[in-house]
Image (cartoon, grey):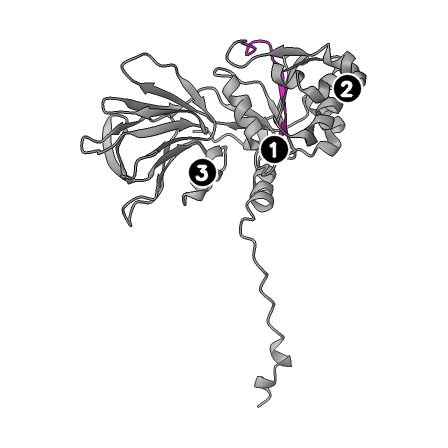
Amino acid sequence: WHIQDPASQRLTWNKAPVNVLVIRKIRDESLVEPFKELCRFLVEEKQMMVYVERRVADDATLSKDEAFGSIRNQLCTFREGYDDISDCIDLIICLGGDGTLLYASSLFQGSVPPVMAFHLGSLGFLTPFKFESYRTEVAKVLEGNAAITLRSRLKVKVVKDIPSNLTQVLNEVVVDRGPSSYLSNVDLYLDGRLITSVQGDGVIVSTPTGSTAYAAAAGASMIHPNVPAIMVTPICPHSLSFRPIVVPAGVELMITLSPEARNNVWVSFDGRRRQEIQHGDCIKITTSCYPVPSICCHDLVYDWFESLAQCLHWNVRKRQARLADVSDSSDTEN
């Protein structure tokens, strides 16, 4: 039995990367200049083909910039849901917050290219790179000189009367009571066996990456993304003893409405594609075989603890003062 050393996870290129997808946080004017600067660097200095969403390329601010016009005309554009770019991208670069990484994951329902995420958003737990040093950092990545974290995803299928597609989820699947004032009441199965019923506001099934998101707010432990696991966290359970649990990666979880449920529930995937779950429907969840290779700024251990400290202020408190030397204490004089 061999436990892989996380430090052995390194980025290697079979061939030099040519096509790069740049994802920019929408509706944030402060990212226009960094976006233009990065695209100019990739196109002019690195001679790469840059792919962007059409709505990003059509941004009015970019259209009015004549100096950027020559670069803009060389950008390859696509539309989410219409154009499949999954087979032609070598590298993904994200500019924004954690949502840009989640969006990048949603574009690739199969194998995902390496993702390099720059912190230009609000939280930045999943975005370890600072944009000020983007030239040096991008050059190192293009040379293959970087550590990676393989962030596991969940493979989810909602089984209804009509066929449904598989969904790849990076953070979490959330089942909640929606607009109803009643408690949700769902049954949780593990590998076909009924484990428990969840009565409360809902339940979160998350990856280790998602353990620092909604699950953390619901009282779950935080799990390093290299740990092969799935976390099940109740949302405001109507029970004093219902604690979050961690199950092995690879098991199949199934969630259905309990026969006694008074109302339907709703499910969402990384906060998107929300839909109603009725009696007779079920949600099947297991670990996906397509993780997200997230490029580290330093290494996968340092980056994670740095994010815990900087973004979530983990274990931040005023330090305890040391005791005065016993020989200096007046209490010991008599």
Residue, disc 3: 214
Residue 175 relative to residue 96: left or right: left
Q: Residue furthest right?
A: 67
Which residue is at the far bottom? 334
Q: Is residue 310 above or below residue 145?
A: below
> Which one is nearer the viewer's eye here, 76 or 67?
67
Sequence-wise, which precedes: disc 3 or disc 2? 2
Q: Residues at badges 3 and 2 in contact (C-beta under 8 Å)?
A: no
Percent position of residue 23, x then y:
62, 22
Report x, y in % for residue 275.
36, 24
Q: Residue at x 47, y 19 (%)?
A: 290
Rendering coords of residue 17 (x, y %): 67, 14
Q: Quadrant of residue 330?
A: bottom right
Q: Residue 26 at what x, y percent from top left? A: 61, 26
Magenta residues, as a range? 84-97
Mark 2 secondary-structure assignment: loop
Q: CA distance from mark 3 to mark 2?
A: 40 Å
- Amino acid type at image mark 3: Tyr
How packed is label 3: few (under 14 Cα within 10 Å), some, or many (20 or more)? Answer: many
Q: Which residue is mark 1?
A: 127
Q: Which residue is pictured at 75% across the width and 24% down the height?
A: 37
The residue beneath circle 2 is 65
Please, what is the three-letter code of the amino acid marked with disc 1?
Answer: Thr
Q: Reply yes or no: does residue 86 show up in magenta.
A: yes
For mark 1, does the 10 Å Cα neighbourhood hold few (<14), some (14 to 19), or many (20 or more) residues?
A: many
| Residue toward you, 31 or 302 | 31
Q: Is residue 194 placed above or below 36 in the rendered structure?
A: below
Q: Amino acid at mark 2?
A: Asp
Give the number of callouts: 3
